[in-house]
Amino acid sequence: MVYQLVLKLKKYKIMSDNKVSYSAKELKEFKEIILEKIETAKSDLSLLRSAYANDGDNGTDDTSPTFKAFEEGSSTLSKDENMKLAMRQEKFIKSLKNALIRIENKTYGICRVTGNLISKERLKLVPHATLSIEAKRAQ
């Protein structure tokens, strides 16, 4: 499917003067942004994992049984939320890595619905975007 998209884009490029892909310089700039975001996301993921994997004592041994039950319930809820956040962070990292693959394939920044370029501003804010604003609004 990606191959067909590239062929269509090449055909379109021959027939039109409109810009249908980002330059090597622009792709390098996006790659730097993505690599930076991946490092930050990996760091955040590490913190989340350590938060839900932490089985340390909360120091509630000398408190009343009622408070201890609340504390344990809160701890369980917190671990569950941290696990959900970690899963979401893993998905984000995967999306960023997929964006790097699209950069290598020279298909980065091309809307998968319209075939038009996604705006630079959008890609700087959401570097893993695969849809233009127009396509996203139409969803």
Image (cartoon, rainbow, N blue to C red):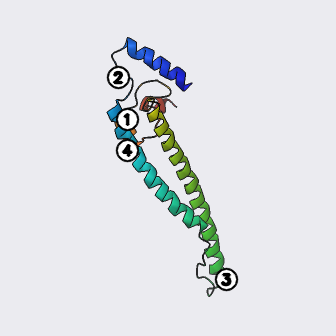
Can you name the residue that lies furthest to the bottom here?
A: 62
Cβ atoms at labels 2 and 4 below 8 Å apart: no
What type is the residue that disc 3 sits on? Pro
Q: CA distance from mark 2 to mark 1?
A: 14 Å
Pointer 1 or 4: first along the chain: 1
What type is the residue that disc 2 sits on? Lys
- Badge 2 element: loop
Q: CA distance from mark 4 to mark 3?
A: 53 Å
Few, some or many residues within 10 Å of mark 2 (<14, 14–19, 20+): few
What type is the residue that disc 1 sits on? Leu
Pointer 2 or 4: first along the chain: 2
Q: x, y percentage for residue 21?
A: 39, 26
Few, some or many residues within 10 Å of mark 4 (<14, 14–19, 20+): few
The answer to whether residue 44 is above or below residue 115 is below
Q: Quadrant of residue 60?
A: bottom right
Q: CA distance from mark 2 to mark 4?
A: 22 Å
The answer to whether residue 7 is above or below residue 101 is above
The answer to whether residue 63 is above or below residue 2 is below
* Residue 19: assigned label: 2
* Residue 132: assigned label: none
Q: x, y percentage for residue 116?
A: 42, 24
Please give the name of the residue rendered at 66% of the width and 76% of the height, measured from the top-left corner.
69
Cβ atoms at labels 1 and 4 below 8 Å apart: no
Pointer 2 or 1: first along the chain: 2
Q: CA distance from mark 3 to mark 1?
A: 59 Å
The answer to whether residue 119 is above or below residue 90 is above
Residue under label 3: 65
Please give the name of the residue rendered at 49% of the width and 37% of the height, measured from the top-left corner.
101
Front-most of residues 110 and 97: 97
Residue under label 4: 32
Cβ atoms at labels 2 and 1 below 8 Å apart: no
Cβ atoms at labels 3 and 2 below 8 Å apart: no
